[in-house]
Image (cartoon, rainbow, N blue to C red):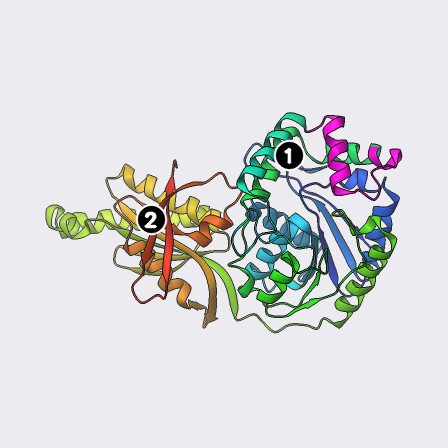
Amino acid sequence: MSIAYQVIGNGPQDIVFVRGITGDLLSTWDQPMLVRHVEGLAESGRTLMLDKRGTGLSDRVREVQSLETAMDDIRAVMDAVGSERAVLWSGSTSTGLSVLFAATYPDRCAGLVLIDPRIRGIRAPDYPWAPSVEEWRTQLAEVRAGWGERPFLERLCREWAPEAADDEAFRDWFVWHMRRSLSPGAALTAFRTAMELDVSDVLAAVRVPTLIFPRSTIPGPAYYAAERLRDATVVELPRFEGVYTWIVDAAHEATIDASARFISRLTAAATPQRVLATVLFTDLVGSTDATASLGDRAWRQLLERHHAIVRRELGRFSGRELDTAGDGFLAMFDGPARAVQAAAAIREELGVIGLTIRAGLHTGECEVSDGKLVGIALSIGARIAAIAGPGEVLVSRTVKDLVAGSGLTFVDRGEHRLKGVPDAWQVFALDGV
């Protein structure tokens, strides 16, 4: 897998320019207003730009892309240029990715700059600014039918960049940039991922300084995020109508100036003691009966095969074993999709040798203490595993929301009271894997 990237500028602080649904390094440099914006950002530090897999100059892929794989791409580019920590600078649909990265890899993130952040893809009672499911269905149908066609992309230009949509040269560039960014299939996947996005449960786990630029002074999604982040500063911008601040001179200058001041004040952080992690609990079903029927020696041999299979699959999906108690495992992952895929693979491979497991997963903030994880997230994961039926992989709503774009599907198992855990928790069963 090859990821295209570019480094602009220099300075003591690294900045990753995390673009939204679209992005193409080549045609970026054909738009003077965008070039001005990138070069302005690069005055504050070494700026890294990349085309996420499946977009622009990066390799096209067949599999569905998720927030998790996008985080992998960012880390890969940072590693390639020797960047240990960076500020993630993003807007609109890419802000959810930046929030998740900051919570999952606090040691790699120095701070966040979020322009008009989008925290949830679908409208909810406490988040009324997002499109409804029906509105999303209409938009997805339009993307499916029209992506790549000039009339559709010109309408999108008027929606995303109304200030420049009457400029013929800008419209030509916009159409070319969209076509180079995404194929029709990749565009549909990207919009569907944006629809499924929900990082609302992750906001409290972000512990890095955050600068937020709202699209409007009217309370909306930017203020929703600011209220839930631990260290957020809101800076209001001159009015802009679309999604691009760099089209409006006053908004561009205010964005670059405020970003520069924010970045210059960042200091080296201590080693993070809390991280966002996905925990996986597995437990063998019917082990007592199996021991009685097989005998101790045969059961020990079968259990050794069980352990070997579990450890092999944990390694394959980048999981880390935390504990083994008899015939159960506790493991952690830095990505929820990999954790669910590991659970499914373990279930399948153990089925081949006649063993059945139940599994439970939850994503939450955990404290790192003496190399171990502690916190209520582990209790929630354990309780979810305890209510799973034979062969079931159950996940919390948080896990389900964070695997947007992974292709994983779930069946609602309703709300449950988990022993020793406050409130009712909605649980979902992995489906079709």
User: In the shown orientation, is residue 414 left or right of residue 151?
Assistant: left
Give residue 272's quadrant in the image: bottom right
Whether 302 is drawn above or below 201: the answer is above
In the rendered structure, which segment of residues is drawn in magenta? 147-171
User: In the shown orientation, is residue 197 left or right of residue 301?
Assistant: right
Where is residue 12 shown, x and y percent of the image?
77, 66
Whether 393 is drawn above or below 10: the answer is above
Q: Earlier in the sequence, mark 2 or mark 1?
A: 1
User: In the shown orientation, is residue 296 left or right of residue 222?
Assistant: left
Please tell me the numbered disc located at residue 187: 1
Quadrant showing the N terminus: top right
Please tell me the numbered disc located at residue 308: 2
Of residues 162 and 348, the one nearer the viewer is 162
> So how many labels did they put on this image?
2
Residue 370 seen anywhere in this rendered image of the structure: yes
Where is residue 218 shown, x and y percent of the image?
69, 59
Whether 332 is drawn above or below 409: the answer is below
Q: Residue at x 52, y 71 (%)?
A: 273
Q: Is residue 164 rendered magenta in the image? A: yes
Residue 108 seen anywhere in this rendered image of the structure: no
Q: Residue at x 72, y 61 (%)?
A: 217
Q: Is residue 141 rendered magenta in the image? A: no
